[in-house]
Image (cartoon, grey):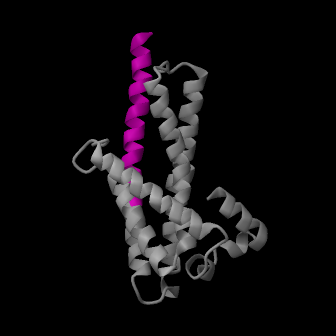
Amino acid sequence: VIFVLLCQWRTKGLENMFQHEELVGSSWIGAYSALCFSCGYFAYDQLDMLRYRLYSGWIPGILMHHLILLICFTLALYRNVTINYLILTLLCEMHSIFLHVRKLRRMAGFRDFNRKLVKLEWVLNWTTFVTARVICHILITYKLITDAHKFDKGIELPLALSGMAGMNVLNVSLGLDLFKAFARERNQQTHQD
């Protein structure tokens, strides 16, 4: 996704990348393939989580996240529209890297909150959460709303707005969970000292 965006930035320039016609009606070089790959990954991951019950809670956020993406991605790929919008939504997966790093760190037993590596991981976790999930998704939602009159009548705009609304709600939930985990790790260290 980063490669697709950088290539587009170099060829079209930042001011032309985010034009409505560019985001809805065309597909950047490599964007369709990246979306196909991501769709396959999310389908596999969803199946794996359901099959082995790798989730918790009544309505697991990760399953809802994957479901929203699968619905939006599959319809967009089938109709070959809004591919570039969906590439922008994939920027949130940059934060997933640090969620996985945190999980691996805890599984490996590195739980000392005062270690520089743990502090760096939390800084990167919060930075990517705010930039890749919160700011990016708010900007995409804003762009959808301001360009609503430019969409043809059809399913694209309602689906995009519904998908972004769902993602923004999930981001709030994820942010609260992340804050609780951060506070818990920090408090556990305080009690150990």
- Quarter of the view holding residue 186: top left
Query: Does the magenta portion include 180?
Result: yes
Q: Nearer the viewer, residue 168 or 93?
A: 93
Query: Does residue 26 appear anywhere in the picture?
Result: yes
Residue that appears at 54% across and 19% down: 114
Q: Which of 84 and 79 is in front in this view?
A: 79
Vertical side of 131 occupied by 103: above or below: above
> Residue 176: x percent and y percent?
38, 43
Residue that appears at 61% across and 83% down: 21
Locate the N terminus and report the quarter of the image it occupies: bottom right
> Residue 54: x percent and y percent?
31, 41
Locate the C terminus and report the quarter of the image it occupies: top left
Instruction: Specify the segment rendered in magenta.
Output: 167-193
Query: Does the magenta portion include 174?
Result: yes
- Quarter of the view holding residue 135: bottom right
Magenta span dominant secondary structure: helix
Spot the residue most to the top: 193
Query: Does residue 169 appear anywhere in the picture?
Result: no
